[in-house]
Image (spheres, grey):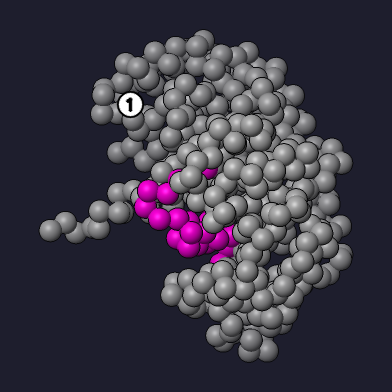
Amino acid sequence: MNLYAERTAMLGTESAFKMGGDIARCEERGMSVIRLNLGEPDFSTAEAINEVAVTEIRRGNSHYTDPQGIPALRECIAEQIARTRGIPADPGRVVVTPGAKAIVAYSVLAYVNSGDEVIYPSPCYPIYESWITFVGARPVPLHLRESQGFRFTASELERLITSRTKLIIINSPSNPTGGVLTGDDLSAMARVIGEQAPAQCRILSDEIYEHIIFDGREHRSVSSCPGMAERTVLLSGHSKSYAMTGWRLGYALLPSRDEALLFRQFNINIFSCVPPFIQEAGREAIENTANLTVVAGMVREFQERRDLVVEGLNRIRGIHCVKPEGAFYVFPNIEGVCENLSVIAAHDALPRELRPLTSPAGLFQMFLLYCHGVATMDRRSFGVIGCEGQHFLRLSTAAGIPDLKEGLVRIERAAADRSGFEAFVREGKNLYLGAP
């Protein structure tokens, strides 16, 4: 009898957190590390939001509450969704969770049986692939192409839909690429889904970066397309838009009250309820229109940083970076660097048991961290299935401009450091995340 259940072997991870140990190891050696790995705004939560939470705690609002979410918060979420998406949004179909990540898990657990198929964009938020494999479903990655700005088309989606398709995941703006789907993109996809997908297929629309869009663009949701609201689990939350990552506050609008009650039941079985003082702070974030100015200022700063980093990366020999339209990441193609430093050959020459633990971009990622002090994420961290031959890094722009400028200097130095890379591989230590 084994200690762990067999299904635990199928559970993935989020490498952005896993990297913390490697960063700590570098800093213990006296290195300064530019942290461009975590997807967390470097801004503080607005003071008005903080004050509401503190006030609620002091008045004793720290007890159990409705597992589905306090009615006042669900009402303001429903109003905000109805206003911004132009669809009916009943508070009885809103479920509040500890961070939006739970909605991904609930959607897979609620709708997907072993053997069913789930279509999802790749590269992607890694938790999609983790939960799909965990329940024994068949992952069907829809590979995003750099040449299309990491958007995908309705025809590409159509080719992947079968009679076994049970869930289709859409993420716009995208993590890790920053790609943003247009209204026309989504309308075409909606038509394909309506015509080709099984009647019981659900859409999970991950819109957690809905407020972080650049160049005057506006957020669009597939739920706004004809026939889609009644098929879509709309996921969003407070972490990114309001710089509230540590508060853990997410939510979903479900297609029906029955489905919302099932998600409520998941809440009851796992954590009971989100703390009421956090929910009241979340209501303040949405209802206080002064916060829109705070969010807009943050987005302007992210756009300035994006422009700086994209321009800087494109000046480095061997790197090409498209300009993202949303979120706070850039996703540069480092194939030229991998060729110039013989990174691909170095990966091919690794012992057979080590090769699956990393990739060429992963080797450069670790070299960049341990030898040049910049923490980034490799392509493999955002969906393993079918990622071979894709040489990208994700850099978070959730860092101050001085750190971003220094990071660019170090990346350029690393991209030309052939002898340093050869020595790093020859030493054979720290070649992958969490290496002993």
Residue at screen point 25% across, 58% down: 5
Residue at screen point 43% across, 35% down: 385
- Reply above or below: 221 against 155: below
Residue at screen point 60% across, 14% down: 318
| Residue 415 x %, y % | 55, 18
Which element is circle 1 on?
helix
Which quarter of the rendering shows the C terminus?
top left
Q: Is residue 320 left or right of residue 20?
A: right
Q: Label 1: few (<14), some or many (≥20) within 10 Å?
A: some
The answer to whether residue 367 of the structure is visible from this angle is no
- Reply above or below: 375 against 361: below
The answer to whether residue 63 of the structure is visible from this angle is yes
Q: Which one is nearer the viewer's eye here, 343 or 400?
A: 343
The residue identified by callout 1 is 355
Q: Is residue 145 left or right of residue 295?
A: left
- Reply above or below: 436 against 226: above
Q: Is residue 183 left or right of residue 339?
A: right
Q: Is residue 148 magenta?
A: no
Residue 182: image quadrant is top right
